Image (cartoon, rainbow, N blue to C red):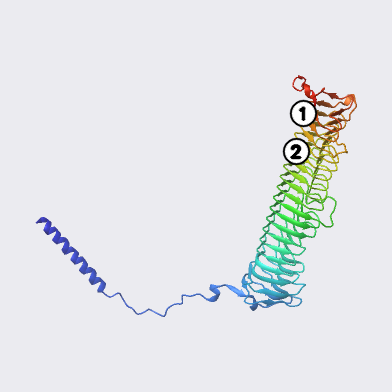
Amino acid sequence: MKSARTTSSLFFVLVVFITIALRSALLGQGSLTPPGAPAPLGKTLTQVEPRTDIATLTGTATAVYAITVAGSYYLTSNLAGAAGKDTISVTVTGVTIDLNGFSLQSTDVNRAAILATIGASLTVRNGRVVGGTYGVRGTTRLACQDLVVEGGTTLGIVGASDSIVQRCRVTGAGLQVGPRSLVSECSTTGASGIFVDDDGVVTNCRVNGGGISGTDNVQITHCNVNNAPVFGINVNDRSIISHCNVMTTGRAGILVRFRCRVEHCSVTDATGVLASGDGGFTAGIECIFDSCTATSCDVPGFVVSSSTQLRNCLSTTNTGNGFTAGNQCRLVDCTASGNSGLGISLGNRGQASNCIANANNAGGIYSTGIGGILERCTAAANTGGAGLRVDTGTIRDCEVRETQGGPGIRSSSGSTIVRNSSNSNGVAGTPQDGFLIEGGRARVEGNHAYNNTGVGFEVTNTSGTNSVLVIANSAGSNDSGEYSIGAGNAAGPIIGPAAVNTTTIPTANFDL
């Protein structure tokens, strides 16, 4: 019974609650008559798009249209210039011009299509500019985007410091920007090319008929240059050139000054009116080259000044040397082949490690200054000189073969020649030594000479006070004899094949 009464009470409460709720819903909700006329909720056209049609602007004595108030401007149709006037002049900071897909046409050849003479932060985008001595000429913080600029008689686009030029095509002229500027995804035709001032960046650009140049601390990456009348790429100190290709230039393909870095670049067909000292790649002191290639140039492939390092570079079929390096330069894993001069030429205290010189026409690898080092190098089928040569230097752990026009390995006074192999050098009837050691005070140890048309080892020194040490070498099948060692030198005994297994003399030389 108690449970039934409780259920009944709950049911009664629920009925009362529903009744009250229904009555409240049926009550009036206030007056439905509006208190007044509706207020406007929309925006004016100027508020929606706060821009000014340039065609509505007035001009001046020197410009067809003059922008004197900061803001945003646009085109609604093509606009033409007038004789003796710039088409659009800008004399205030903070202006954006949207060409809206239209063109500025028929600009006077002695005037500019868009000229900012006062103020900064001009932005021009999305359209076409035709004619004029300048297409777009701005000041500081010029920004040009998605433009086609045609026929500028001086330059297509000019900006001062901190400018940005992106996705622009400049035809018949070039572009120039000031310090700390960026040029990206642009193309130019015409001799002016692209110029950036200090700390500027040029990336993903194509230049035809001109070059890319800059001053200090410039970065140029992923660019292609064709048919430059002088230099393909030309920059000053502490600059970086990366992943660029240069083809057909009037002088050097890529020219850098001091302490620059050049990596993953190629130069092909540097031809024309060339100056002394030009190379496919030309560099000042203390530069670094990594994975670069010079091919078919009418100059040496690489011409670099002192204390420069080159790694994994290739120089092939160039006129002159493959590599011409100054004092204290180092080449590692580099290859020179088919060049009309030497494969590699090093200055004082130069070093070549793990390098290859094949089929060059004036010799393989030379260090003709003092203190040079050639180590773990290979020279094959070079003509017109020695395969490897040092003057008062070191050749160690190298292999030379098939040299024509000089000995396999040649050295002068005070050199160290150890653990090398020299074979098959010379042609029939033309004696060419495996090793030619000139002068005194040298060490010749642990080398092997075989199948050469001259002598295996020839030591020309005859001064007892300047003795050459000749020990632990081996020679065989050389046409003019295995050893020719001048009197007064310190040579180990020469032992024939029969005594090889029984001798206990560590300094013995072997006649095989």
Residue 158, numbered circle: none
Residue 122 in the image: state x and y as whole percent: 66, 66
Nearer-the-camera pick, 252 or 117: 252
- Quarter of image, res 64: bottom right
Sooner in the amino-acid sequence: mark 2 or mark 1? 2
Identify the element where label 2 is drawn.
Answer: loop
How far, Cα to Cα, is label 2 from label 1?
16 Å
Residue 276 in the image: state x and y as whole percent: 85, 51
User: Which residue carries the number 1 mark?
Assistant: 446
- Quarter of image, res 362: top right
Q: Quadrant of the C terminus?
A: top right
Q: Tell whether 139 sits left or right of 45.
A: right
Q: Quadrant of the N terminus?
A: bottom left
Category of crowding for the residue at label 2, using alpha-carbon neighbours closer than 10 angstroms: few (below 14), some (14–19), many (at least 20): many
**Which amino acid does the dot numbered 2 rest on?**
Cys
Residue drawn at 61 percent across, 74 percent down: 52
Judge whether residue 331 can be spotted in this image: yes
User: Which residue carries the number 2 mark?
Assistant: 377
* Disc 2 and disc 1 in contact, CB within 8 angstroms: no
- Quarter of image, res 199: bottom right
Single out the residue that lies furthest toward the left: 1
**Which amino acid does the dot numbered 1 rest on?**
Gly
